[in-house]
Image (cartoon, rainbow, N blue to C red):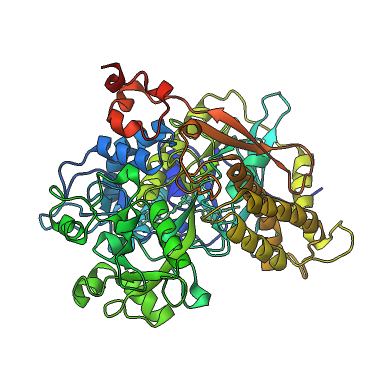
Amino acid sequence: MTQVERHTYDVVVIGAGGAGLRAAIEARQRGLRTAVVCKSLFGKAHTVMAEGGVAASMGNVNSNDNWKVHFRDTMRGGKFLNNWRMAELHAKEAPDRVWELETYGALFDRTKDGRISQRNFGGHEYPRLAHVGDRTGLELIRTLQQKIVSLQQEDHKETGDYEAKIKVFQECTVTELLKDSSDGTDRIAGAFGYWRESGRFILFEAPAVVLATGGIGKSFKVTSNSWEYTGDGHALALRAGATLINMEFIQFHPTGMVWPPSVKGILVTEGVRGDGGVLRNSDGKRFMFDYIPEVFKDKYADNEEEADRWYTDPDNNRRTPDLLPRDEVARAINSEVKAGRGSPHGGVFLDISSRMPAEEIRRRLPSMHHQFKELADVDITAEPMEVGPTCHYVMGGVEVDPDTAAATVPGLFAAGEVAGGMHGSNRLGGNSLSDLLVFGRRAGAGAADYIEGLSARPEIAQSDVDEAAKMAVAPFDPTGDGVEENPYTLHSEMQQSMNDLVGIIRKAGEMQQALDKLEELKGRIRNVVVEGHRQFNPGWHLAIDLRNMLMVSECVAKAALMREESRGGHTRDDHPSMNSSWRNKLLVCSIASGDAVVPGIDVTEKPQVPMRQELFELFEIGELEKYYTDEELAAHPGRKA
Ligand code: FAD
């Protein structure tokens, strides 16, 4: 029988980024005993890296803004593939969630008259991103953590124990979700994992689990994501029997650092362009004017004069195309580089130095100034940055109910980047931080409602615990054919293949090659051997994470091969146009039976639920015609008239 440390909770939240912390706060406020588990140090999550801001239509800088405009922008950004109910809830609730953060102690930058300041970002019609310089995520995490500490202080007053109701398990990786199938319900019963430092196993018994594990960027070679974004939550959900949607849509942020090689991929915030920075090619030309797609022509300026006037007079001018949605800008940069008009290190130039005084740049973009000085020896107040696309965000994730964040497995909930649907085929900048807060809260509430409705707690079978432990230690004693493999080699081959073959521009033949490579790696993973013991052993940790990355990469490649059109974060060289008949289709990933180490993936089509009529009518017929089929538009008043 496996030696394992056991804990019993009502809710286990896996992930301590914005989504996880907000879910935990909600669950605890509903009186539930809540565990927060994170594989990195508490406070080190993707959320803390967020720079530009949180999108919420507070209308502080332009009073024309409201939830309907935000909803429209989000749907447009996602090319109408978004789960419209999520986009609606998000747009309506984001302002309250930002205000709530201030009640927890956050302090956003202010307008001259003392309101929360909001900045421009790609795809947002009005200045909408509440921010703290270019360190917004840090303030968000700091504040949510502070709220948790204050709740723990309340609990201490009542019970004498700070951790009576909410406890954080940091540097603890969950490797498997466990279920109770004994009564035929097949529902969540807990989670199994290990302490990274000691390698000892840990078991959480709980009727509800909230996945808040973030993204999958470490499956790609050039990425803004850090080491822990190995798609664990996506893979845990799949293995538990839940479904993923939209996995073909990966956001390549247009502006990552391209030089020096050691920092390639590190993010350069869109706030640089939001605050006036412009993209130029090697001829010094502001090339984005050449890349305004038909669907956005009425909203974006087609000349420099109007684009520059827009910063100070947005009501009478169209916005700069430097702030087109990210997918458009990333493709434009890619084309300029391919056409031989790139910067010396294979990117393009991002220029803020000629656009505002040095002092102002240092004040508005302190982290960017520091980042370039320290890492690239470039002073952004005096010279342009070199930037290029980097894998940044996954639009796809766990298929959830929009109102409760419930996945298709009873007792499983998901929020934040690990959940799918909200952003459709492309996320607008700033819409992730607001997503975390809105759906983190809803996931905590969803878990609480679910638990209230239970008549009995689920039970975990010892055989399932033994099986999870066996799978975790397998790399110490591989069962393969004797050729020893190194987890780092496999990881690097997978990253290279995903980057080159399922990257920013895709072709059927290349994606098939990537799938063949993944199949090969799935065979080789059985031979992965790790040296040493379970005490802090990064090679072992990677060997475990590799299982997840291989599954998630297969989802991305298979769904991308199936979707024969280009939309948002999915561009097909062999199917370059957007196709209305694909707008209504979700590609749903689930596990196929078979291999227990890295199960295969099935992808099936499913129609989207049609948008509620009053939301549908928020859009002009002329705009919808660019995305919808004639059949779908028959119910629009513009057609009936
Ligand atoms: P994360 O914050 O990614 O947290 C995931 C948590 O899950 C971590 O605690 C991790 O340790 C834990 N975890 C993962 N796997 C396991 C496991 N197996 N067991 C236990 N724990 C696990 N978005 C915006 O809206 N505005 C911005 O300005 C912005 N800027 C960004 C800048 C950068 C550099 C990056 C990388 C992203 C940026 N984003 C921005 C995107 C946004 O930050 C992320 O999408 C968001 O923070 C994800 O939050 P999350 O709560 O879903 O997960």
- Nearer-the-camera pick, 378 or 635: 635
- What x and y, as percent, mark residue 638? 27, 22
Q: In the image, 217: left or right of 580?
A: right
- What x and y, as percent, mark residue 30? 43, 35
Residue 303 placement: quadrant: bottom left
Q: In the image, 591: left or right of 587?
A: right
Relative to 350, residue 321 above or below: above
- Nearer-the-camera pick, 541 or 633: 633
- What x and y, as percent, mark residue 474? 80, 56
| Residue at x 39%, y 44% (from the top left corner) | 435
Spot the residue most to the bottom: 377
Quadrant assignment for the C terminus: top left
| Residue at x 24%, y 67% (from the top left corner) | 364
Q: In the image, 587: left or right of 463?
A: left
| Residue at x 26%, y 53% (from the top left corner) | 130
Can see residue 82? yes
Spot the residue most to the right: 481
Spot the residue most to the top: 640
Relative to 146, residue 183 above or below: above
- What x and y, as percent, mark residue 284? 30, 72
- Nearer-the-camera pick, 11 or 584: 584
Spot the residue most to the left: 113
Give the total number of marks visible in the rendering.
Answer: 0
